[in-house]
Amino acid sequence: MTEEKIAVTSESTALPRKSFATFPVTRPTLALLLSVAALILIVPPLLDALYLRVFISSVIFTIAATGIAVLYARLGLVSLAQVALVGVGGWVTLRMWHATGLPFEVNMLTGAMISGVVGMLIGLPALRMRGLFLALITLMGAAGFQILVTGTQFPNGGEGVLGIAVTSIFMPRPVLGESDEAMLRYVCVVAVLCVLFVELNRRTRPGRAWALIRKSEACAMASGVNVAFYKAWGFALAGFIAGIAGALLAATLGVLDATTFPASESILLFALTVVGGAYNWLGLVLTGLLFRAAPALLNDIGVNGHLAYVIFGAGLLHALITAPTGIAGQILEGLKQLTKRRVGR
Amino acid sequence: MMTYTNRFIQLALACLAFALSSAAFAQQAKLCGLNNGKAASGQPILVGSVVGKTGPDDFSAGALAAKAYFDCVNSNGGINGRPIQFLIEDDQWKPEVAGQVASKLVKDRGVVALVGNGSFVEMTVNAKLYEQENVAVLASACAVRECFEAKNIASTNQGPVPSNISAVQWAVEKLGSKKVACIGLNIPSNGVWSCNLTNDWLKEKGLSGVSVLMNPGAPDANSALLEAVASGADTFLISLPAGLAQAFLKAGQDQNLRDKYKWISPTPLYKQGIPESIGAYWGDKVHVAIELTKWDGAGPDNKRWLAVMDKYGAKSDPRDTFSQAGFVSANIFVDALLKMDPKKIDRANVTKALKAVKNYRTDLLCGPWYFGDADFHQANHASMMLTVTKTGFKSETGCVDVSGKYYDKIRAMEKAQKLTGS
Amino acid sequence: MYGVFLVAGLALGAIYALSGVGLVVLYRSTGVLNIAYGAIGALGAMLAWQLEQMQYPEPVAWVAALLVATLLSVAYGRLVAPYLSYREPVVKAVATLGFALMILGTANYFWVEAPRRLYLFTDTMGFELLDVHITGTRALVLVATLATTFGIAVFLKHTRIGLLMQALANKRELSSVLGVPVIRIETYAWLISGFLAGFTGLMFGDLVRPNPGALTFLVIPAIAAAIVGRLESLPMTLAGGLIIGVVESMSTLIKPIAPYRSIAPFVVAAILLLWLQRNRKLTFSGHD
């Protein structure tokens, strides 16, 4: 499936077009827009307070997973630092709000941009490495962030650069997301904007460069693609999106805690992105749900927290083994088979 | 979560056995609630609890004790006939999860109050929710500043500050400590806060204190010990969770530093298994301040706690300070509710009733307890000192109140609002 | 004063190095970076603690810990890893996180957080060096790390199985075509690595504390040591582990960075790695 896509996109490199103007709304994108619209209108009032909160978290990490998917599906690169970058975005957003009191959206974009720069720095070794090694370098970044942030903690209204007060002051939610219901709608809209932003990148110059790089760096270089720049661009984009997720998480809770961002969570989010399926938006939605809704469900029905780890670990292994294209890949494949059979009749 | 029907059958059987077992029952002191041996069957009263169970430490002992007490109450007439349905949720030490489960209890299930909460993260995240929803929290294992400085949360335990200062106060008086290194976790609202206030107290007394903070993400007891040694202190105040405190002592043993320093600790080291796990090397050398009475205390309420735990608790439920604190919280809660009209037990009335609790006396606590309508709650501020021996704990002092400006203010407020009745 | 920090750093570094060596031996032969390495050791250490509590003699506890760790490792290697053998190395690695979570959950379920202490006979031994008291366990972990690294290096060079392991490390498909019994050789790698995990778990459980969570995530600084050895070189991994341990311990003396000293593994690894890779320009898939 990916091979196909790559072939199509690399073909289009030969025929550059003004894609910004003619950004096409394809069927999957339309499906995404429609289903999110339905979700936003119908679902929130139906949920109880627990699952409102759970789905807010799930959507936020779907956004974060979108960043992982950019690198993995488009460039074949692995970042094991995405949750740490979510933390960076959250840190900057909180720091900005406590320092300036600007509207949330401004702080969010600042957080995202700084997170993007950090993401690019962590990804710099990618210019010379790939595969497991690069993944491990990013993991070292995530582990380093974990140590730093447990030492400094998140700004909560105090003095100085680190902004630590002993009693926390909460950052208010964005004006459009005051209640949990409104917040769920808010994060869904932001999620769609993020997915569209990634699509925009994929269908324009960066996307074509990525496709070539993925096929062969030598080829890409030979055809005049600035390999270093577009790889770094991929990391920056992934970091930017992680930063958005971090800002939303900070807004939902008002405060953040270092325990949310250990290095192991970054590994887990990547693993679940592979399990959900990195090649389409359905997989990313599944990733968010697996990362946050599945543990919440186990907790809600009263499974012992430790046993939940066992179930979760076993599920992860099983899914990685049985669904190489991710669960979303399996579902879509299944649907394709179904429609084919119908047409055949 | 609790499967209540099963519980009821078990309880009914247990009750029957108990009723048949002896006539002495009638002469026995009151065990719980109405103490009439009748199972409550009215409309249940929903009560919740948020605890940090899955994570670096298990803070559920208070909620488990509360549950045992509620089970006892339910089979002894309930709240004037209405049973308590107790829902315990695990926040897994994760702020997001803490927010989720609190929403579930407060908004979805509509609990009238929360009892026995114990957590490192829950209070910070949820204090606002509790205030907005006007639900009162009778916690039993508060560890962070936000827990003591929230409008709707009051705890029966002491928290790190009075416990730290109690230990230091004793060490200064009895061991002649001059400079104390406070070894805590580098968490602003926990280790940083409690060590700072301890250092302030020492300064007030013309002595000096220094903080040695450990990174909670990768705690390395050995280098914390070395840092403490490098600080030039003569006394080490080990203000850490039990597991880490023990690792710290172990590092001290490796360097054979026992006799070069004085070793004191707040309540976390008062835990079953500690004398054995720190080893005979430390016998009579480590001194601990405790927030509630000793487990084997002779007071009637302490005996009642043990009896209720044996009869209604699980064998595996801890019998420690936090269990005692949870028991006290549950007692206060039940006593307050029993005074209410059973038909008018709703959240608003329960919150009002709990906030009105004052001058509550029990031998489990050193002083009288009150909820109070204030922005901060620190009713429990007197402790006892123990020494860890080779095989157990031995008492050094009875109840001693914490001195210092910080507590003088609290005592003045208690007096002004007549919260302690004295 | 410096002596104390040096000794503490060497002991810590030896644990990192030993874990790193266990990871590298496995990765070289099987292509799996085992994130469950720490968890495997954790279960062994917890079991040893349990047996000591039940008054079994200490050798029983040692054997049980090493045996359980080895078995867990081999079980994963035989039963699960083959299903993932044709996936990319990153997926193989993150899959072991699933295994780690399973072991961690199990260990935490049976051994709820409580003050525990693992006693080993080496604790009571000890000697003074440069005014520093060095316990037998600290000495043991250092000596064992040096001996193991050397021993494994010799084993890989001079025994048939060792040579076959090296062959697998170099060209996997080719080796299998040439008749190298891949599965059998891989099993040896899982076995050695599991044994080392068990030993590391025991040492860490004794020197720090027997805590499943702390032990499980010890794997992350251990990966840093393995990275220094480029997941390939045992001597470099050993050196990396020891340097990291000493840097981390010595940082305690520098006030402003003292609270962040546990970042040392990642900073050291990142710097060394970038330096080692300084001459590479292009990257091609398949060559990491």
Image: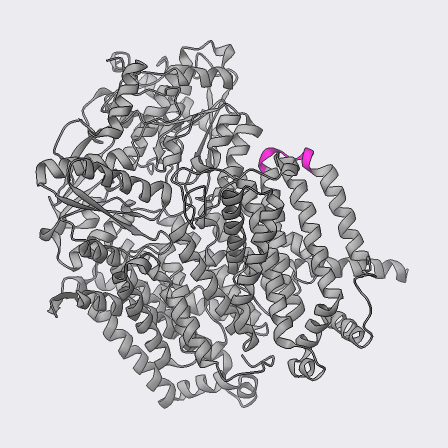
Image-quadrant location for residue B76 = top left
| Picture quarter with the N terminus of chain A | bottom right
| Picture quarter with the C terminus of chain A | bottom right
Considering only vertical position in the picture, is B350 above or below C40? above
Provide residue A12's location: percent of width, then percent of height: 80, 73
Residue at the spot x=51%, y=36% of the render? B101
Of A318 and C249, nearer the camera is: C249
Range covered by the magenta-colored residues: A44-50
Residue B389 counted in the magenta span = no
Residue at the spot x=28%, y=74% of the render? C145
Instruction: Tell which residue pokes out farthest to the front in this image.
Output: A100
Of B60 and A88, nearer the camera is: A88
Considering only vertical position in the picture, is A269 above or below C283? above
Number of marks present in the image shown: 0
- Main SS class of the magenta portion in the image: helix
Image-quadrant location for residue B399 = top left
Q: Is residue B1 shown left or right of residue A26?
A: left
Provide residue A203's location: percent of width, then percent of height: 76, 65
Provide residue A91's location: percent of width, then percent of height: 50, 50
Instruction: Tell which residue pokes out farthest to the top in this image.
Output: B341
Residue C71 appears in the picture as rendered: no
Residue A288 appears in the picture as rendered: yes
Of B13 and B386, nearer the camera is: B386
Considering only vertical position in the picture, is A110 above or below A219? above
Provide residue B69's location: percent of width, then percent of height: 36, 24
Q: Is residue B32 shown left or right of residue C52?
A: right
Residue at the spot x=32%, y=79% of the render? C149
Color encoding of the figure = one colour
